Amino acid sequence: MKNPAGRTDEQITQALLGSVPQREAVFVYLYRASGWRERVVQHVCRDGGDAPAGEDVFQETLILFDRNIREGRFRGDSSLQTYFFGIAKQYWFNRRRNIRPESLTPATYSHPDTDNPEKITLLIERQQMISHILEVLGEHCKKVLELYKLSLSNEEIALEMGLSSPEMAKKYTYRCREKFRTFVLGRKDMVEHLDIRLHHGK
Amino acid sequence: MENKGPYYDQIDAYLSGQLEPGEQEAMRKAIGQDAALAREIEMRRLEFDVSEALIADVIRQQLQRLQSEPSPPVRPPKIQKIYLIWLIAAILVVAAIGIYRWNRPASQPQAMPPPASTDQPKDIVPSLPSAPQAVQTPNENPQTPRPTNEQNRRYLALATELYQNPDFETLRGAAPDAADPLETALTAWQKQDYTAAVSALRYIKSNDPKYWRAVTLRAHAQFKLGQFGPAARSFAAVADSKMMPWCEDADGYLLLALLADGQAGTAAFRARLDKVLSDTGHPWFEQAKTLQSRLNSK
């Protein structure tokens, strides 16, 4: 008899594209019941790493995997499990060889720059910039930006944030995005960084 | 965002690589010719990256919480033992309820009535009855024990046999809080105090983000208490909510609750069963097939 807790690829995808509780539930499932984590840890241990490194690779793979699914990068050429291991193996391969700086986005991750110090410097600068922005954004705005990026409706954002109506959620989202823009545009170093990126065509 | 031109609405799609190749190329050209658009793209890209960093942090925090929690028992050998214990416990509960029902005077207002006869179908669509109705013929003496239907007893046994405990960790979610009613109910559930579990969830509001988890847990607790009618109503609400992943499991448990409540002969039960059987990817597809074949063999 099939385990009722088992999830098909479609169900996993739908949950990642769904509401916050659906996402939380599928992360619990992927961590606890899918068997994917054990396989990643096993691979890392066999390939010169240890269990904590394996756990770390699983975590970072899950982040990349989630973003790729949400941004429609997975084309369905394989099962989700195969796709997940593909990312995990590449991540571990690159990390062992110290190919790239920490925590790149999926796009840059797919094509790591190993021979362009200027781009690597820009990436490091950008990470520092993001950390700085996160420090100044309030907790409320951080949550709003996170939910907005997850493509939740105003109604769902209102529900998650405990706001009285979808209109309030819309207002909050607008305010937080404006706060973000105003902060960045008020910082000369950040504007310069954006302009440099423009000239690099990225 | 202020709409300044034909490309401004497409920035998000462009950054996500979701434009058609022709549109993508047109956007690249427009960026080369329009400095303000190019700046806007970079600004938006930065907002994307900040938001993704936030999402990544949330995932990391959730995984760290999961790592720090004790893992549930390893599946194959233990799980069977657990199910066996649950099955024995469930049979004892059902037997106790049966004895109680048998000895209870029919006029007692709060007591659970026997499952409805298949000759008198109860339709739960579109709305479930507020309480199961006692079957009583005009000549029956209210002081004498009511006869129970052999077939319904078999259905009840089948429902109990097919019932499996839900995945507690999925219900629990990412950020358990000891003061949370859902957390209280889960703790009560683990102690097999199903009355306390139902009670803890009594005041949870429909706008609470954990509402559907709470209704799911309440439905299971009601089932364990032998309140199959209320359990069916709760499972039906979750199943009809279309809230994944709760709704699909609720489809299956609803079948068991209806079966236990003596509604296996109703059109509503058949419709619910057919719905699961028509979807080969449904997590309860195999159980539904088993259920159908067991019902047909009786």
Image: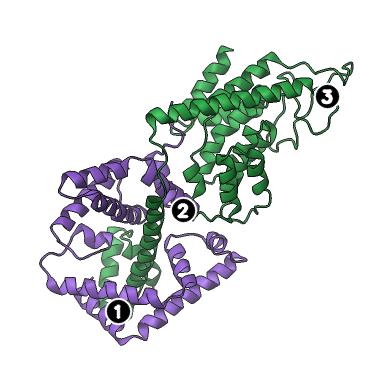
Chain colours: A purple, B green
Residue B242 drawn at (x, y percent): 55, 44
- Helix, strand or loop under label 1: loop
Q: Which of A149 and A56 is in front in this view?
A: A56
The chain carrying label 3 is B
Percent of width and height locating residue B234: 64, 40
Name the residue nearer the viewer: B42 or B226: B226
Which SS class for mark 3? loop
Q: Distance between the residues labelled 1 and 2?
A: 45 Å
At a point 29% along the width and 68% down the height, the residue shown is B27
Residue found farthest to the left? A115
| Residue linked to disc 1 | B34
Asked if badges 2 and 3 are on one and the same chain, I answer yes
Q: Nearer the viewer, residue B131 or A155?
A: B131
The quarter holding residue A95 reads: bottom left
Q: Tell me: B40 left or right of A54.
A: right
Q: Which amino acid does label 3 sit on?
A: Ala
Q: What's the CA distance linking mark 2 and mark 3?
A: 46 Å
Q: Name the residue under label 3.
A: B106
Residues at circles 2 and 3 in contact by the CB criterion of under 8 Å: no
Split into 4 quadrants, where in the image is the N terminus of chain A?
top left
Q: Which of marks 3 and 1 is nearer the N terminus?
A: 1
Residue under label 2: B174
